[in-house]
Amino acid sequence: IFATRGGCYDCHSHDARGDPAIGAPNLADPIWLFGDGSTKWIYDSIANGRAGVCPSWVNRLSPAEILEASVYVYTLSHGRNSSKPSLP
């Protein structure tokens, strides 16, 4: 989803490190602009968009696809050895 249909890579780059020139935050570090970095907050950001910059994906991706993308971003930002993410 991140690298294909969701198009997240377009702003956040293929390595999810973002693009400061366009204001796309790094999704692979532990710093969060919204919420606490839990899958609940990540899911909400993907589903509803943020600050009019990141679009809402709720009508473009299925809930399962949004969850898939949020778990992927959670894994990137919390490392491979972190505990399992909680589902939204």
Image (tube, grey):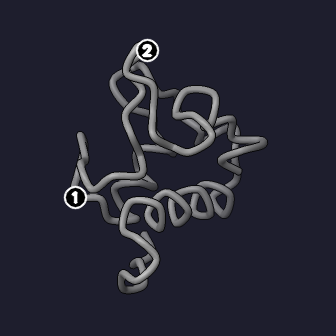
- Mark 1, secondary structure of its residue: loop
Q: Amino acid at mark 1?
A: Asp
* Residue 14, percent from left and from top: 63, 40
Q: Residue at x 38, y 60 (%)?
A: 77
Label 1–label 2 contact, CB within 8 A:
no
State whether residue 19 is above or below residue 67. Answer: above
Mark 2 sits on what residue? 22
State whether residue 30 is above or below residue 46. Answer: below
Q: Residues within 10 Å of mark 1 (few under 14, many from 20)?
A: few
- Which label sits on residue 69? none
Mark 1 sits on what residue? 36
**Viewer-closest of 16 and 48:** 16
* Residue 86, percent from left and from top: 39, 78
State whether residue 71 is above or below residue 52. Answer: below
Q: Residue at x 63, y 58 (%)?
A: 63
* Residue 3, percent from left and from top: 71, 44
**Residue furthest toward the right?**
4
Q: Amino acid at mark 2?
A: Ile
Q: Give the Cα distance between marks 1 and 2.
A: 23 Å
Q: Residues within 10 Å of mark 2 (few under 14, many from 20)?
A: few
**Residue furthest toward the top?**
21
Quadrant containing the C terminus is: bottom left
Residue 4 is left or right of residue 70, and the answer is right
* Residue 32, percent from left and from top: 25, 47
Q: Nearer the viewer, mark 1 or mark 2?
A: 2
Q: Residue at x 59, y 56 (%)?
A: 69
State whether residue 17 is above or below residue 75. Answer: above
**Viewer-closest of 58 and 5:** 5
